[in-house]
Amino acid sequence: MSYITFRNSFRYLFANLFVFAFSLASSYSSPSNIANDTISFNFERKIIQKGSTETVKGIVYYKAPHRVFIDVNSPIKQVMVVDESKLTIYYPSDKKAFIIKSRGLIPMPFIQSIISVMKDDYGLAEVGYSLIKHEKKDNRIYTYWNPPKEHKKHIGEFILATENDLLVYAEAKYPNSKSAAKSFYSKHIDLNGKHFPLEIHTEIQEVSRKTDEYVTYSDVKLNIVLPKQAMDFKLPANTEVKEVSW
C-alpha cells in the first residue's frame, strides 16, 4: 500500500466522526465522564463517493477512557489501535504498520456516537458549546449550539434534533454557516436506559465533493471482559513500520 493510498483511506475512515469528534474529544480526560468502562460491537461501514462504493466490516472493542481496538476482517485484514494521542494501523498479510502520533487526542472511530447518546445534551455543554436556541418543528425538537470561542475560526454551529426523546438528526457547519456534515439516526435500541441508534447515515460535504457514509452496528455489549489482544496489542517484531506525526 502506498502512502497516498493509506492517507486517503485513513481520511475517510474517520469521516463519520466529524459530527462528534470535536465535541466529545475533550470529555475523555477521566473515567468519571464515561458511562461504561468497556463496550464491544460489530460494525459495517459503507462509503459511497463519485459512484464508487467501499464496504468495511469488523468488530470494535473500547476501554475507557481512550483506548479503541478495531479488528477489520473485510475487505482485508487490518488492525487499528487508538490509545490517546497514538494511532497504530497494522496489516498482518503485508507485515506493515503505520503509527500516527498527534499532539492532541485522536478521535476514536465509531465509539463517539455510542458515548454521546449516554450523556445529557450529548456532551456538548461540558466541552464548551453554548445553547443558542431551541424550536419545535412538527414532532421534532431542534437545539442550536455555538462552538467554544477558541474554535470558532475552524468550526461553526452544531444542530441536534430529537423525536420522542430519540436522537434522529445532527448537523455540523463550517464557520461560514455552510453544512459540513449531516447525520441521520435510526433503529434505536435501549442501552442502560439510553437509546442508541444502530444505523447512521452521514452526508459529508467538502467543497465540491460529497461523500455518503452508512454505518450499521450490531451485537452491542456493555461492561464486558475484553480480549487480551484488545488490551495489550503489540506489533510483531518483524513488522515494517512507518511513523507519521500530526
Image (tube, helix red, strand yellow):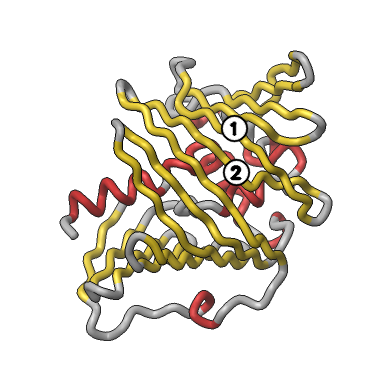
| Residue 195 location (% of width, % of height) | 76, 46
Q: Is residue 64 left or right of residue 91?
A: right
Say if 177 sits above or below 3 in the image.
above
Residue, x 39% and y 42% (percent of image)? Answer: 47
- In front here: 16 or 145? 16
- Classify the position of the N terminus by image quarter: bottom left
Is there CB contact under 8 Å for labels 2 and 1?
no
Say if 117 sits above or below 162 in the image.
below
Residue, x 59% and y 45% (percent of image)? Answer: 24
Reading the image, the residue beneath label 2 is 199
Residue, x 66% and y 21% (percent of image)? Answer: 144
- In front here: 161 or 33? 161
Say if 200 sits above or below 60 in the image.
above
Q: Between disc 2 and disc 1, whose residue precedes?
A: 1
Say if 135 sits above or below 196 in the image.
above
Cα gap from disc 2 to disc 1, whole angstroms: 8 Å
Circle 1: element type: strand
Reading the image, the residue beneath label 1 is 184
**What is the three-letter code of the residue carrying label 2?**
Glu
| Residue 18 location (% of width, % of height) | 48, 38
Q: Is residue 161 left or right of residue 147?
A: right
Q: Is residue 72 left or right of residue 66?
A: left
| Residue 210: quadrant of the picture | top left
Residue, x 59% and y 26% (percent of image)? Answer: 158
**Number of numbered discs visible in the structure rendering:** 2
| Residue 56 location (% of width, % of height) | 41, 54
